[in-house]
Amino acid sequence: METKKWTQLWLDYKKAYDGEGIWKIVLNGFTDSQVVVANALYEFRRGIKALTGESVLEAGKDEEQGKKLLTLTISNNDSVSKEGYHIQGSDEGILVEASDERGVLYGVFAILRQIACGKSALEVSEASSPSNPLRMMNHWDNMDGSIERGYSGESFFFEKDEIIINDRTRDYARFMASIGINGVVINNVNVKAAASYLITDRYYDQVARLSEIFNDYGISLYLSLNFASPIEIGDLDTCDPLDKKVISWWKDKMKEIYERLPLLGGFLVKADSEGRPGPFTYGRTQADGANMLADVIKPYGGIIIWRCFVYNCTQDWRDTKTDRARAGYDYFKDLDGAYHDNVILQIKNGPMDFQIREPVSPLLGGLQHTNQMLEVQIAQEYTGHQIDLCYLIPLFKEVLDFHTHCCEGKDTVADVVSGRTMGNSLAGMAAVINTGNDANWTGNDLAAANLYGFGRLSFDTDLSAEEIAKEWIALTYKLPEKEAGVLCSMLLRSREIYEKYTSPLGIGWMVTPGDHYGPSIDGYEYSRWGTYHRADHLGIGVDRTDKGTGYAQQYYEENAVMYNDPEKCPEELLLFFHHIPYTWKLKTGKTLIQHIYDSHFEGEEQARGLAADWESLKDVIPAVSFDRVKERFERQLYNAREWRDQVNSYFYRKSGIADEKGRTIY
Amino acid sequence: METKKWTQLWLDYKKAYDGEGIWKIVLNGFTDSQVVVANALYEFRRGIKALTGESVLEAGKDEEQGKKLLTLTISNNDSVSKEGYHIQGSDEGILVEASDERGVLYGVFAILRQIACGKSALEVSEASSPSNPLRMMNHWDNMDGSIERGYSGESFFFEKDEIIINDRTRDYARFMASIGINGVVINNVNVKAAASYLITDRYYDQVARLSEIFNDYGISLYLSLNFASPIEIGDLDTCDPLDKKVISWWKDKMKEIYERLPLLGGFLVKADSEGRPGPFTYGRTQADGANMLADVIKPYGGIIIWRCFVYNCTQDWRDTKTDRARAGYDYFKDLDGAYHDNVILQIKNGPMDFQIREPVSPLLGGLQHTNQMLEVQIAQEYTGHQIDLCYLIPLFKEVLDFHTHCCEGKDTVADVVSGRTMGNSLAGMAAVINTGNDANWTGNDLAAANLYGFGRLSFDTDLSAEEIAKEWIALTYKLPEKEAGVLCSMLLRSREIYEKYTSPLGIGWMVTPGDHYGPSIDGYEYSRWGTYHRADHLGIGVDRTDKGTGYAQQYYEENAVMYNDPEKCPEELLLFFHHIPYTWKLKTGKTLIQHIYDSHFEGEEQARGLAADWESLKDVIPAVSFDRVKERFERQLYNAREWRDQVNSYFYRKSGIADEKGRTIY
């Protein structure tokens, strides 16, 4: 067997049972000249061999002596929805029905997953269709090989301004396909330097090869686009989206792009944000910018994914009227309905930036006539850099389950971004990915649960965080029940623990500026980023009510009323919406300051509990993986202790109020 | 005239008056085959032409029609002390007496300086000998071209791991010679990467060329040394200074070095500090390390300059017993007398790290049997990055004038580091230099006053900050009296202004971590660097008395008693030595908190005063220089405002005590 420098993640199937059959493939309405189907068969052959020891008959053979003949039948069935599948085991084998190639591939992966999770091949059974039309990964990979917010090594797509294509590329596509991902943006949304030239002769051939490898696993390749391309790679002196020369330049460029990259899904654009160029430069709206690009890409079936992460990143901290949280809604709500059909707005889950706790963005569902997709981040930028364990699926579930009250019924975020609310077909979910060229792909082996989890959740938003965790554990480690339970519990507790020892009650930030790992309570307090906690000797929190910045009023009434009132506001978001005295009594009966102390002592203690739980798994986890994770836990404990002591000391020094329990605060 | 990409700084002489003579050179006891003497004559020729329009007769000529013949007589006079000079003008010309070539060179520069400052050539008169035997510049230049703590562009010595030698190199040597500098360390004390190979074949030829250019202007070239060289460039697995293989390796290496670099002055070593290797690794003392190197370099007349900047840089902020301020004394005092004769300890002016206000290091004079030299920093690492105006000579004067009480009389720092106290000849001053390859050498044109000033002060520690400022202004800008007075006042006020709007009363730090520009009040509060202010809702400051860390006890009794008592402690250092309540009454009658508010409002206002003064000089300063400095003042005002508002807001939010004057605090 080939030794690889990277792991197979959840596709490293372990023996489930000793099967005694041999498999024959029957294709109805599909052919193995369809590359995605052929790859599905490759995955079946590879997976079933590992899981049961059973082989698939070689071409032309009809039986093998002493083996029971089982049939994997793959049938075209147009009543199965797009990219969906039916799988059904029986004594004769397994029937996979799908209406398209991707459905076949996902069906085969479902078979293997069910076997790994405990079913026999002949028992597998599932009818599934994806919740979201678009299920995407966003790489923030730079062409020099660095990754913005990457915690797992360097890029495996780029190195020294060249595109890397090797066996790992295909494995990556396999992993993504196995969890239902159907779109990947390979380059950083901040498109600079060589990346601006991805849509030129310099890179077309390599991008095309990459798009083919992806396509063979049912994945469309997308690129992040430099809005200033007409200036940077063209010879224009403007990128005004309403300028005729600009439009004409883009028309020609898009024609060229699709001649060279016919498989390209479209473009992701970060404009007018954090120093990126955009339509605002020319007094144009975000819609002007997005629609112009959408119109020129339309003939080729491409889409424009336009990010809503637009805010004033040169705010004066003295200014308490401006509120970064308001920015997305303020910039985009008025243009609701103005975006063309092949534009989709990509909206971060919260109004700030991937904090451990934020309210749901009021744009989600706030827009009622605009294609929209949810953006989450599995790269743990603010949630522990894949050093600290932080299983994020519970957070994503909360977001998806949130009732926006945008309409009667079908008003959750899951409804909105799936297209169910508005009946639109351009809809979905995207994650800023947490991978790099580390051997284990995700730095922390356990962070792969977020990678796996996001894919599975975007395919089926009804799955629970626990179900996903169990699947991932079974596929990755195949542990005895008790130990699987320990690991599952670790994952499920981890987000709350991380929240407890970091910033309290939704206030966010308090991280080391720039790096975003570890505490710096005032680190973003006097900065230009719109990220303040406003703590003084009496209290802490940002007044975002109708008497403050008015952010709470961006929600539909039910939520606006709830958030506006500190008595009704969910306490985990109390400091996001209100400036609260340290002596304020929480529902637990504790004062705010005591809650801060208690939660930080508890969080650190519980982090030690996670590390102890991991230690208890020493005998059942492969040593190389065990050691890698153990080393991460050591760093997490150091981090948790720093957070605990710095937060507690900061608030004790500021408030002068002692811990009721008399614990050590510095 | 040749157009250069760099300025001539204070050697860009302006016409002082129209001279009517012509000069003849007479050498007694010197010859122009002595290169330093020849360069002195070159400087005279160049300078007198620019200052008076007068020429020097060409070789073989004895007169020029219609011109009065003047004579520059350069005579050897062994009664003039080493590197000193006597200059005396008369109707016949000028007599320069010196006992060595450097004295001749310095004498000639003194003539030109006096003319530029208003005397006629025939009136010049001075008898001077250098206060300090060693007058050095330390470059923190890396071989990749970057400069650690450089604010004036890249290195002009190194680029892409190669040594640069061009016309600028010679100009640099001229500038240094003109202010009396006789030693230059060209590479960063943190010796890494290619710099470790400066003492190998790879670089010998180029270093030798550089040392010759320096030598021609009376400057010895020194190198920073990697203590781990036996490992890094040798093939040993240890650098234990008591290991015979190591000693033998160094002997061979030193022989090789001096064969190739006969002009080398010696080495500067940063060991066991901030991650640098050193003798502590092997359980050896700092003396073990320094003496071993000193012994092997001794046959060649070289010296070892050993830095005392050793401290625990992984301190736990929770630990209030450990005190970084103590570290230098704790590590080095016990070894007083153990260092060999050709070792000199280089001691930073304060116990921390070049803050705008620190007490004088208790090691200075605390060591009574050890060669020691003073290290200051004219690179404005913590004092405004050569953006903010901060004329540092007043600070250095305070340090030099400080009575250590190490003995009766001759107990000032100036006495100690000049060698007067102990009668030692290895003594002096060094500055971490503020130059780079910017056209104006120092980023801010006005920061050249620190470059000029350090050299002059190290040559003559009796000069006042004001005298030095006036010289520099006359040489650099030659302004009318009133405007010269405005600029001189700006320089002299600038340090106090910078102090006012930054960290109060000697507490230091409160800067942006890493970068060290701009405020971050808690930036170093919870860090590993031993740099804390310990502010809580009641007060601020570090207790370094006998009841605290005991640092104050490292001084001789008179000072120890003074610092130990908050009533006697100089108020500008109050928070360095004591934890003081905000309600403490200062000698002005103001409370501490009110002092913080007032000084920050005043400091910012006075910074605006500096900018306004500069504006008033618009008509008399060359436009290119005026504009460069004006742009710096704009940045300084932004910085001063940030400091003012962040410091005031921080303490208001923490103390809850309002400003008596009701000014805006956020």
Image: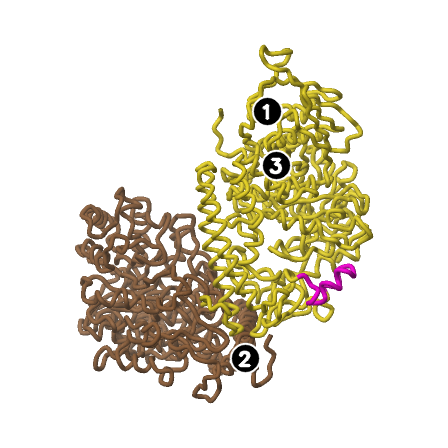
Chain colours: A brown, B yellow
Work out whether residue A64 can be spotted.
no
Magenta stretch, overall SS: helix
Furthest-bottom residue in view?
A589
Name, please, the residue furthest toward the front. Answer: B482
Position of residue B575 in the picture relative to residue B299 (left or right) = left
Work out how far the residue at label 3 is from the one at label 2, CA to CA, in angstroms: 57 Å
Nearest the viewer among B570 and A145 is B570
Q: Nearer the viewer, mark 1 or mark 3?
A: 1
Please name the residue that numbered disc 3 is placed on: B202
Q: Amino acid at mark 2?
A: Phe
The percent coordinates of residue A359 (x first, y second) are 35, 75
Name the disc covering residue B97, or none.
none
Which SS class for mark 1?
helix
Mark 2 highlights which residue? A601
Q: Position of residue B125 (x, y in %)?
A: 69, 30
Q: Is label 2 on the same chain as label 1?
A: no
Q: Which residue is mark 1?
A: B48
